[in-house]
Amino acid sequence: MVKVAVLGAAGGIGQPLSLLLKLNANIKELSLFDVVNVPGVGADLSHINSDATTETHLPSSKEDKTALLTALKGANLVIIPAGVPRKPGMTRDDLFNINASIIKSLAEGIAQSSPDAFVLVISNPVNSTVPIVAETLKKHGVYNPSKLFGVTTLDIVRANTFIAQLYPTDSKPTDFNVNVIGGHSGETIVPLYSVGSTGKLYEKLSEEQKKTLINRVQFGGDEVVQAKNGAGSATLSMAYAGYRLAESILKSLTSSEEVVECTFLNLVPEIKGAEEAKKLVGGLDYFSLPVKLGKNGIEEVKYEILTKISDDEKKLLEVAKEQLAKNIEKGVSFATQ
Ligand SMILES: NC(=O)c1ccc[n+]([C@@H]2O[C@H](COP(=O)([O-])OP(=O)(O)OC[C@H]3O[C@@H](n4cnc5c(N)ncnc54)[C@H](O)[C@@H]3O)[C@@H](O)[C@H]2O)c1
Ligand SMILES: O=C(O)C[C@H](O)C(=O)O
């Protein structure tokens, strides 16, 4: 039975994500933090007759740090959807200037109040915000790379849905679990349709269809940003995806079943398979790959997948690596300056 803290709980993602968490029988306490509107969200959720208790934490001023520290106290799992979303015409990197500072201050709170928690970073640009959290926790001497997750699950969710839409009579979205690796923005998102559950169907597609499908996964976020027309980016599908990763982590704490998910992680030698992965991705310090989850977090990086990919996917990876290197460096230098 665990305590989960949601930072940014009153937002477009925070609210539906908190609703899903409120329904999870493994969660004993749900701690909701935001800089606006969170008491109302908490009051509303608290009427649901599921077992998790709901508490809310709203700072009384910009200087008030106590609300965050209290929200995080004793949390086993912290999920961060705090920050601004995109509008049409913006890239995720355009969010860096605002979101980097928000993420850094929240990571400082985690370092102080819940240093042992699993930390799931949703806020964009994920390719840079994850290194910011890592460097901030390092500065405070409490960094555990096995417990830091950049949430790329929405890319997997989209990849499953979009291929199923191409084969409506032969498949359904729940048939698939596509490995999507790399990062979480445009061309850094690399869906590996040629391996695993989609291999056979993918091979049947024409070159043009393959290109269109991959492009749709890489720019699925833009599809939603355009459709919302200035009112933000994906929130409901993101809440579902963030919940899926949180649920998998909770499952790995309570069952002996093997649980594997893709996540954007820090490739450090203390994680099994990370050194091998790092060599195969040109020395990058962070990359999204399938990982085996366990009681202490990321137990093993399933790097072998990198040796099984098609020549076309290798080309996609080359483009992804170049962009990722810049995004990672931007996050690291912000947090270490
Ligand atoms: N990883 C992904 O796949 C993915 C998917 C969708 C959106 N996102 C990102 O998630 C973030 C949130 O998106 P959204 O649609 O929920 O935005 P939103 O504006 O609806 O909600 C963000 C919430 O964060 C809160 N907030 C701002 N500063 C804060 C702080 N210092 N502490 C706590 N809370 C704070 C705001 O008050 C707001 O309630 C964006 O950066 C967006 O780009 C990531
Ligand atoms: O596209 C965005 O800005 C939000 C998110 O990263 C997404 O993939 O939907």
Image: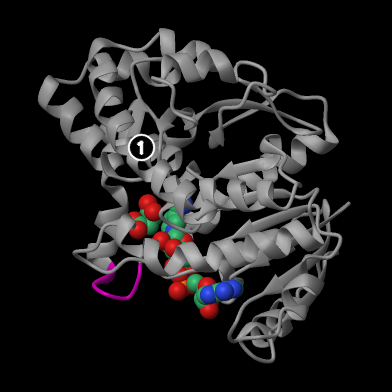
Q: Position of residue 236 (x, y in %)?
A: 47, 61
Q: Magenta part mainly helix, strand or loop?
A: loop
Residue 215: say if magenta: no
- Left or right of residue 180, residue 263 in this image: right
Q: Secondary structure at mark 1?
A: helix
Q: Amino acid at mark 1?
A: Leu
Camera sees residue 84: yes
- Left or right of residue 153, residue 210 in this image: left
Residue most extreme to the front: 337
Camera sees residue 12: no
Front residue of 292 and 43? 292
- Left or right of residue 291, residue 327 in this image: left
Front residue of 101 and 147? 101
Q: Residue at x 50, y 42 (%)?
A: 153
* Above or below, comparing residue 102 to residue 67 in the picture: above
Residue identifier under label 1: 324
Q: Position of residue 127 (x, y in %)?
A: 43, 45
Residue 231: say if magenta: yes
Q: Does ligand 1 reach within 8 Å of label 1's beta carbon?
A: no
Residue most extreme to the left: 208
Q: Label 1: how many residues lie within 10 Å, few (<14), some (14-19) or many (20+)?
A: many
Report the span colored magenta: 228-232
Q: What's the image's color scheme? A: one colour
Q: Residue at x 49, y 31 (%)?
A: 285
Q: Position of residue 42 (x, y in %)?
A: 71, 80
Residue most extreme to the top: 307
Residue 29 in which image quadrant: bottom right
Q: Residue at x 79, y 33 (%)?
A: 296
* Above or below, comparing residue 79 to residue 292 in the picture: below
* Badge count: 1
Q: Position of residue 219 (x, y in %)?
A: 26, 46
